[in-house]
Amino acid sequence: MTDIRIYSLGEVKTLYAKPLLELIYDAATVHRVYHAPDEVQLCTLLSIKTGGCIEDCKYCSQSIHNNAELEKETLLKVDEVLAQARTAKDSGSTRFCMGAAWRDVKDGRAFDRVVEMVQGVSDMGMEACVTLGMLSEDQAKRLKHAGLTAYNHNLDTSEEHYKKVTSTRTYQDRLDTIENVAKAGVSLCCGGILGLGEKEEDRIQLLHTLSCLDPQPESVPINILVPVKGTPMANMKRVDIFEWIRCIAVARILMPRAMVRLSAGRLELTREAQAMAFMAGANAIFTGDKLLTTPNPEKNEDMELLEMLGLKGLKPFESREERAA
């Protein structure tokens, strides 16, 4: 991070408090230094193992502690996943993300199958990303050897507020996995969720913590909570869209090299709100009708919006070798 400025918590507070339009201008200026302003990465997220998670995250439909209407599914077969990856690539996605509802990774046949999925996706020339819960350094190295581009492990919120979100793991558990990922040489995809009942101070603290990770995340998803019936957070107050934009802009300034990714909650956003998010420095979206278990805008809507804004998707690669070149 030698060429990246690390902001103090006080500086992040000052940045966060800037007038919104001035903040967006600053973020857009930073964005143009590090990224092509007319390019957006298209990503696809697939749930490869749905439900049955023993964690008690209060927002999640996949937790066994919650009463969401969700059909539990076993780990998908490799050929099923690779077929969907190929479809995603043909639709313009350059990153294929696979999520399994596990608390942590267990060595054995299931993990072996995930490693095979990663290898297959990588061999297609796509960036391969997985989110599997907590994992060891050795497991991260196996995934790296198979061609894993990034490991997703969101911090969700501030350390102080995190204990109000889940009790079955700690913030340090999250940081330990992030450290294992870094030691294995795998890039980190790490962001947060807005709308978990947090205060402004929690959002500032989260952004500061993310920016102080070494190395900084290469991808930062900024999610808006999608309330799910049957979970303890089903009736949470919806986040003000300008607060979402503010967090995107601050994330862009603090982590200028990162892909700032629009993730959960996008279905309910207007085209104008999404356009402002791109102006504030967002440059990646998830396409497809679902994000794990929550709905997402249809592909045609996304393509129409990008065309209207003069944006284009990053070009897919043909092979792992071309991607690495």
Image (spheres, rainbow, N blue to C red):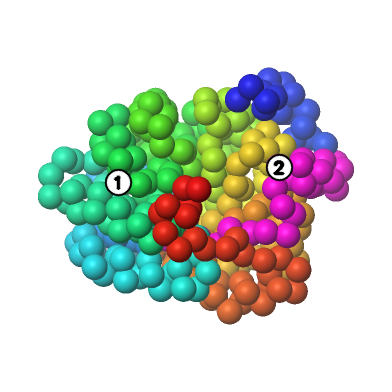
Q: What residue type is labelled 2?
A: Tyr
The residue lying toward the viewer, choosing from 114 and 133, is: 114
Residue 223 on the magenta span: no
Q: Do the residues labelled 2 and 1 touch (CB within 8 Å)?
A: no
Q: Going by the image, does 110 lie left or right of 213?
A: left
Q: Where is residue 272 in the image (x, y as percent from the top left)?
A: 75, 66
Q: Going by the image, does 283 lie left or right of 161?
A: right
| Residue 154 seen in the current view | no
Considering the numbered disc 2 on the image, is that residue within a helix, a strand or a loop? helix
Vertical relation: 142 (above or below) 89: above
Q: Where is residue 13 in the image (x, y as percent from the top left)?
A: 73, 28
Q: Report which residue position mark 1 lands on.
A: 146
Q: Report which residue position mark 2 lands on.
A: 34
Q: What stretch is highlighted in magenta?
A: 19-45
Residue at left offset 24%, top offset 54%: 116
Q: How crowded is mark 2: few (under 14 residues within 10 Å), some or many (20 or more)?
A: few
Residue at left offset 58%, top offset 79%: 300
Vertical relation: 271 (above or below) 121: below
Q: How many marks?
A: 2
Q: Which amino acid does label 1 sit on?
A: Ala
Residue at left offset 67%, top offset 66%: 312
Considering the numbered disc 1 on the image, is that residue within a helix, a strand or a loop? helix
Q: Where is residue 221 in the image (x, y as percent from the top left)?
A: 55, 48
The residue lying toward the viewer, choosing from 202 and 117, is: 117
Vertical relation: 241 (above or below) 198: below
Q: Position of residue 248 (x, y in %)?
A: 67, 46
| Residue 206 seen in the current view | yes
Residue 35 on the magenta span: yes
Quadrant position of the N terminus in the picture: top right
Mark 2 vs mark 1: which is more N-terminal? 2
